[in-house]
Image (cartoon, helix red, strand yellow):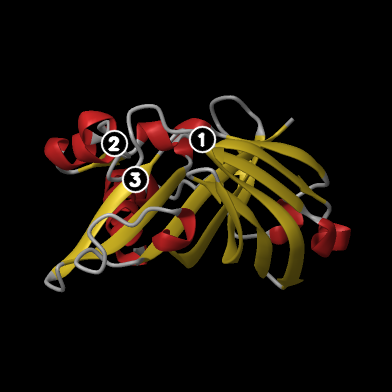
Amino acid sequence: MRKTLAILAFAAAAAATPLIGQGVQLPGQKDASRVTAGVYKADPGHSLIGWEVNHFGFNDYYGLFGDVAGTLTIDPANLNAAKVDVTIPVGKVTTASAGLTSHLLRAGKDGGKPDFFGPNPADARFVSTKVVASGTTAKITGDLTLNGITKPVTFDAEFTGAGANPFNKKLTVGFEAETSIKRSDFGINYALPMVSDEVELDISVAFEKQ
């Protein structure tokens, strides 16, 4: 999934090339000294969770959850005490195929259980329980609630940048994280094993200081 985000990052970098050519420094820099202690709120317009499954053993397929909300509480002097609490609106899932997106959210046939999420799925939520930091990376363990089921999950996270947002002037910090889960652990069993049980998750979140 990182390759998908890399393509998006390349496109953004290409768009910014004229500014870089003029010697303009990007507002965000991978400089941990820019991070100050406090409570940060996720910027939903710039926070995404990508997911990846394998389709029939032929190739991988991707989708996105956007509008991620939540908070990060962090103190650079005690990173292992950091707390993350984020909510993912499953009902806003999107894919490159309108038909597949509709399938993910359609009701079950004849009143039966939906194949995937159904038309009014509850938001997913991740609440951290343990953080083990090492430099600009960390392992973040917590409880992921998805489809009404809660399971422990550990993310490999990386600090990607900090600085003042040039538009709203808020101090912003960015992180990327990745993990893999088994969807069957969360009661999402449709088309197993033709569509892989393993789902790779790739998170890119910007948090703004409150």
Residue 202 to residue 104: above or below? below
**Residue 84 percent across, percent down from the top left:** 70, 49
Question: Reading the chain from its start, which is encountered first: label 2 or label 3?
Answer: 3
Picture residue at 63% right of the left edge, 37% below the top = 70
Front position among marks 1 and 2: 2
Residue 158, picture quadrant: bottom right
Q: Residues within 10 Å of mark 3 (few under 14, many from 20)?
A: some
Q: Nearer the viewer, mark 1 or mark 3?
A: 1
Instruction: Identify the residue under disc 2.
Output: 112
Q: Position of residue 53 (x, y in %)?
A: 28, 62
Quarter of the figure with the N terminus = bottom left
Foreground tag (2 vs 3): 2
Nearest to the observer: residue 28 or residue 3? 3
Which residue is label 1 attached to? 123
Does residue 191 appear left or right of residue 126 in this picture?
Answer: left
Which is more N-terminal, label 3 or label 1? 3
